[in-house]
Image: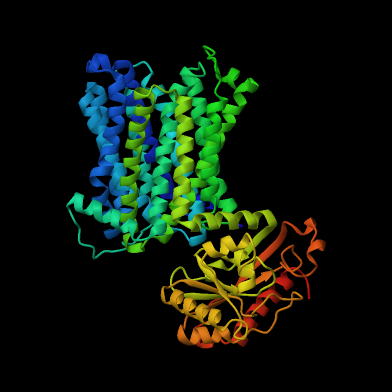
Amino acid sequence: MSQHSQFRLLQERRFAPFFATMALGALNDNIYKNALAAMIVFQSAKWSGLDSSLLVPLSGLVFIFPFFLFSALFGQFADKYEKSIQIKRVKLLEVGIMLLATLGLWLQNLPLLFFVLFLLGLQSTIFGPIKYGILPQVLKPHELVGGNALVEMVTFIAILVGTISGPLLIGVEADWPIWVSLACIVVALIGWGFSLAIPKANAVEPSLKLNWNVLTETWRNISFINQNRTVLNSVLGISWFWFYGAIFLLQIFDYAQDHLGGGEQLVSALLALFIIGISTGSILCEKLSGGRVEIGLVPFGAFGLSVFGFDLYFATPDQVVDGLTVMAFFSHAEYWRISADLLLVGIFGGFYTVPLYALVQQRSDPARRSRVIAGNNILNALFMVVSSLFTMLILGVFGLSIPELFLITAVLNALVATYIFTLVPEFLMRFMTWILIHAMYRVRTHGLEHIPQEGAVVIAPNHVSFVDALIVGGLVHRPARFVMYHKIFNIPLLNLIFKTSKAIPIAGAKENPELLKQAYERVEESLNDGEIIGIFPEGGLSPDGELKPFKKGIEKILQNNPVPVVPMALCNLWGSIFSRRDPLHKRYPKRLWRRVHLLVGEPIPAHEASAERIQAEVDALQKRWLAQQGQP
């Protein structure tokens, strides 16, 4: 579990100025977009003679269009050039854009205001790859989830505040919309001021040759995503979330009016519930994942998105109460279920999306990370456009209701999630492992940063229970393949997780020499591929909780593959329900949810990693933990 709140990042210069800059930019986008939408609804006939039902969706497409056109180009800029300078220039561009918006508002020139909206979309297109590309550079690995959680939280808060304040500002009586203009200019200037304090973030690939052909570069960005199956499916998962989320965000307005009988205030209240949920879920991710990129939360989030989206259909009342106020909505029990559904859809949306963003940043090639993010932005925009077309099809062509749209979307979400988790079993395996760990134990970790971020490495923990591999594998931030005794590997139910995580069964030379040979071959292949191999050097479960002599098999592995060895100590796990301290019928439930510690030592170079040295390091870790607990 995380020992520090992610909110402490807001006190540090490496993150706080960037966070404020990003938050104010998102706020400005949403103030202007929603103010323009309100102007279109109430004044479009006077300005253009066009129907607002056409102009409002058109405004959304105008904002999204630059993501298709320019994401690939500016993804290259984000990788090639130093990022803090780029952010300062982007924020200065925002000031200029808002001055142009002031001219458009003063002249009440709709084409000019749409051009400003296009420029805001362009600014967001430039900033997007920088925003998600800079996080892994300024944050430590265990801070990545917390940093992404804060970014997601403030993004949706900006959507909420902008959605409410934009129409309010445009509604203030004046000769022209001066208050919208002033708000946008002031927010832009403050954002530019914060950008000046952002520390330097070096270019990750300064030798990159720019490709100005956006079509071929777009295709290349997509190909970068496709080079890693986990990254590809994470990006598809993020894009699907924007498909799902866009439907809920955009349809809450008509849902509140047509199916609940409420007005603008109720719309704001429902939107607030949804966004407070996403913000809460995003922040809880850091707590639930212990500061790691815990992709086990993704299936959990997908499950909640479907269940509570599905339930929203059944919670919608059959009869509409005209003039339903916010006070009446929250004071009547029949509406509490709707409130809970919207809040929980948001919370589980946070569980779903934050680990995916962090995983994309973690697993992408650092030299191409911003271009991967650019490709992600292109796909996100595409999915949002498809979401709009899908909504028009369901509501317009088929004539179904908004609650039925929510129901269909929830069912589709379940099907899409199942498909993604089938393609990448790692998601589902981590989910099952996460559930097991948190249902059975309270785990604390110390020293996980000693495990290298990339490259082949052997991790060597002590062996005190049948679920040691699950606990260690679920806590290590990179996928690990464990070598384990074949009888443990074949335990029912656990076997499914072991197979999914590509564990390697092994047997003694006398017991099954062929299986032993195959195990050594698989270990060598995995280390050659730069993976983590987990080995229990004791060769079997401890019969008494004490450390047994380490066997020489680990030295044989290191002879052919000289990689570092990271010693580990599982503490306080002996005596738990999956250990051998008592017969099975005496392993009482009181031993559930016990506090377990995983201590990780510094890597031992291959040439120093004898069985005796590794055992001594593990023993030292155990003694350190005992000393911390005040035990001899």
Q: Can the viewer see residue 98 in this picture?
A: no
Residue 576 drawn at (x, y percent): 74, 64
Q: Residue at x 29, y 47 (%)?
A: 126
Disc tally is 0
Residue drawn at x 22%, y 54% as measured from the top left: 217
Residue extending farthest to the top is 322
Q: Position of residue 178 (x, y in %)?
A: 32, 23
**Which is more toward the observer, 311 or 572?**
311
Q: Residue at x 26, y 33 (%)?
A: 62
Q: Quadrant of the C terminus?
A: bottom right
Q: Is residue 456 left or right of residue 392?
A: right
The quadrant where residue 155 appears: top left
Q: Residue furthest left?
A: 213
Answer left or right for 509 relative to 563.
right
As drawn, 486 above or below 4: below
Nearest the viewer among 368 and 202 is 368
**Quarter in which the N terminus is drawn:** bottom right
Q: Nearer the viewer, residue 358 or 434?
A: 434
Q: Is residue 316 above or below residue 66?
A: above
**Residue 378 position (above or below residue 290):** above
User: x and y percent of residue 42 in the render?
Assistant: 33, 16
Residue visible at 19% across and 56% down in the picture: 211
Name the spot of residue 451 as percent of width and height, x first: 52, 70
Is residue 272 at all visible to an observer of this figure?
A: yes
On screen, residue 97 above or below 505: above
Indicate how the structure is coloured in the image: rainbow
